[in-house]
Amino acid sequence: MAAPSVTSRKLQVVQSDNPDGPFQTFVFQGEDHTLGNALKYIISKNPEVQFCGYTVPHPSENKIHFRIQTYGVPAVEILRQGLSDLHDISDHIEKTFKNSVVQEEI
């Protein structure tokens, strides 16, 4: 008998009373300190953020719990903006690196 396929979401929202509220916990599956620390740094720079942090529940679990608390803006909007900013920064770093490699080869 074949094993049942398990579909896992990369990002889950921990159940809360107000999903569009100013504080929320998100669970990133398959991620660790690499994403957690970079995203925490970016989101913490936002002036609307009161608190931002993450934990790895257990070293054997490949996931992080990411907590955002704002001064009134929906936490999910802050997360979206943080992920977008981190993506833009990563693209810039990649382009700069590739340009440097090309210039060194000339």
Image: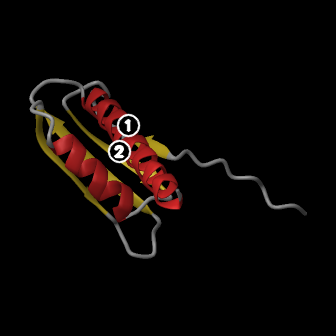
Which residue corresponds to the image point at 34% horizontal and 64% vertical from the top-left? 33
Q: Mark 1 belongs to which amino acid?
A: Asp
Residue placed furthest toward the right: 1
In this view, the residue in front, 105 or 11, is 105
Q: Neighbour class for label 2 at 10 Å: few (<14), some, many (≥20)?
A: some
In-image side of 87 versus 9 (left or right): left
Percent x, y of residue 77: 29, 27
In this view, the residue in front, 9 or 78, is 78
Q: Neighbour class for label 1 at 10 Å: few (<14), some, many (≥20)?
A: few
Which residue corresponds to the image point at 47% horizontal and 60% vertical from the top-left? 104
Q: Which residue is mark 1?
A: 88
Nearest to N terminus: mark 1 or mark 2: 2
Q: Which dot, 1 or 2, sits closer to the camera?
A: 1
In-image side of 51 versus 9 (left or right): left
Residue placed furthest toward the bottom: 60
Which residue corresponds to the image point at 34% horizontal and 42% vertical from the top-left? 89
> What colour scheme has been applied to the protein in the rendered image?
secondary structure
Q: Which residue is mark 2?
A: 26
In this view, the residue in front, 13 or 40, is 40
* Residue 42 lies in quadrant: top left
Q: Mark 2 belongs to which amino acid?
A: Phe
